[in-house]
Image (spheres, rainbow, N blue to C red):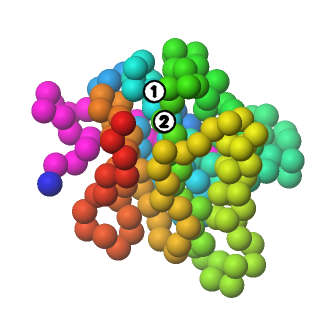
Amino acid sequence: MASPSLSILGFQQKVVVGIADMAVSNNPNSVLATYSLGSCVGIAIYDPVSRVGGLLHAMLPDSTIDLEKAGRKPAMFVDTGIPALFRAAYELRAEKHRVHIYVVGGAQIMDSSGFFNIGKRNYDAVQGIFSRHGLRAVAEEVGGMVNRTMFLNLSTGILSLKISGQTEEVVLCKS
């Protein structure tokens, strides 16, 4: 089975988004990727008209624990990362009413007792921001106890996942 990062026209550029980071692009030859989302949440957005896409890999729900760090690295936190992701996409001509949103991660990894519940807290923070801004995810793959890697193909809008323990990529959504 062909990887979504390959196209019939040749190899596409893979842009890797690290932990506490984000990327936005309007290059149709790019695939945005982030690896090993455990308790972190990955938010992908895609405007099918302008073909602008973005990907955020947020670690923690609330920036108030370290406002200085949030100022330097807004993608570290859900509450500062999501607005930064949308602002960057709007600069490339994405429009809020056209944007498809995908949420991945929020698992309970390395916390089997559920004491910290970082994954759940991250997901709850995402839902709170979406509710306040009239946003809704078109597809989600959250919770559980597995790591997930996500790929957003900017030429097609296809969001695919590699889920820990599974051999084949899963298409979460086709825009």
As drawn, is 150 to the left or to the right of 156? right
Give the residue type at disc 2. Answer: His
Residue 84 visible in the shown view:
yes
Give the residue type at disc 1. Answer: Asp
In the picture shown, does residue 93 fall above or below 41? above
Question: SS for tag 1?
Answer: strand
Circle 2 crowding by C-alpha within 10 Å: few under 14, some 14–19, many from 20: many
For the point 64% across and 64% down, the residue is 119
Q: Which mark is residue 100?
A: 2
As drawn, is 146 to the left or to the right of 164? right
Residue 73 visible in the shown view:
no
In the picture shown, does residue 22 fall above or below 171? above
For the point 75% across and 78% down, the residue is 115
In the picture shown, does residue 70 fall above or below 46? below
- Report the span colored magenta: 2-20
Q: Which mark is residue 47?
A: 1
